[in-house]
Amino acid sequence: MSDTTKADTAECPSTLVVERVFPHPPAKVWRALTEGPLLAQWMMNNDFQPVVGHKFQFRADPAPNWNGIVDCEVIAVEPPKRLSYNWGVGPSEYGLHWVVLWTLTPTDGGTHLRMEQSGFTAVQQAAYNGARYGWNKFFGGLDQVLGGIQ
Amino acid sequence: MPAVPNAVFKALADPTRRAIFEGLTRDGEQTVHSITQRARISQPAVSKHLAQLKQARLVRNRHCGRETHYSARPEALAPLVDWLKVYGAFWLDRFDRLESLLERMEP
């Protein structure tokens, strides 16, 4: 499968994009994105409803510095083309907030799925305490990320 | 000024450049001459690698007489380490899981 990950090339990176073509029709991909039990199988447990304004949570196992909960609110539902929700991690006062936008485009025999996560500016501010990452850890981690991208 | 992650990825994907960058991070500022001696490749090749590292804002340089000194800017990695690493890996993993779910689903 073709697969790309990229950050925007602006001076201040604020968007992450992941794209892939799946050999399945948009209606089927849409179901996987919007039916709670299906969504749970590849994303996280959730109480998602495809209704604009619906507040829901994704719930994963807690991890260091993260209670495992993502607070979301549905922004846009346009089957089977576009789905968007807020994506918030941590307490609302000092938590981190993004917008996730899914775009489905029919291709010859399949669907081009694009995930855009935007609003990284706040994260970047917090990022400058990145010094806590050891060099070894960083280079190890980078190899993994590059391995996943190439 | 924040670094551009695409350029950072590209710059560090090459093992020679990574070794040069690591050396500057570990041992501090060095001249092109001394970097060349360590890298065991030609000076023009080293200069080319340094130019790419500089373009990614991973290193800075200063001229002193006939020598050019280079030093690392590890802060350029911060945006990459923090969010691209975490979310890049996260979404790639989720896309893989979505792909296998789609295979299992009824048409």
Image (cartoon, helix red, strand yellow):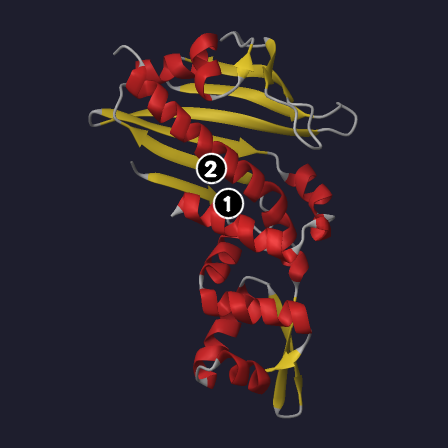
Circle 2: element type: strand
Q: Quadrant of the C terminus of chain B?
A: top left
Q: Which mark is residue A70?
A: none
Which residue sits at x=39%, y=30%?
B96
User: Callout 1, which amino acid?
Assistant: Asp
Q: Residues within 10 Å of mark 2 (few under 14, many from 20)?
A: many
Tag 2 residue: A17
Residue type (three-letter) at the residue carrying disc 2: Val
Residue A8 is labelled as 1
Q: Residue at the location (51% across, 72% down)? A: B51
Query: Residue B3 location in percent, x, y?
Result: 60, 55
B76 sits left or right of A93 in the view: left
Contact, mark 2 vs mark 1 (Cβ under 8 Å): yes
Front residue of B22 and A84: B22
Q: Residue at x 67, y 26 (%)?
A: A89
Residue B65 in the image: state x and y as whole percent.
66, 92
Q: Nearer the viewer, mark 2 or mark 1?
A: 2
- Looking at this rendering, what residue extends furthest in the right direction? A93
The image shows residue A54 at horizontal and vertical percentages of 59, 8
Q: Is residue A39 above or below residue A147?
A: above
The answer to whether residue A15 is left or right of residue B97 is right
Quadrant location, the N terminus of chain B: bottom right
Q: Quadrant of residue B34?
A: bottom right
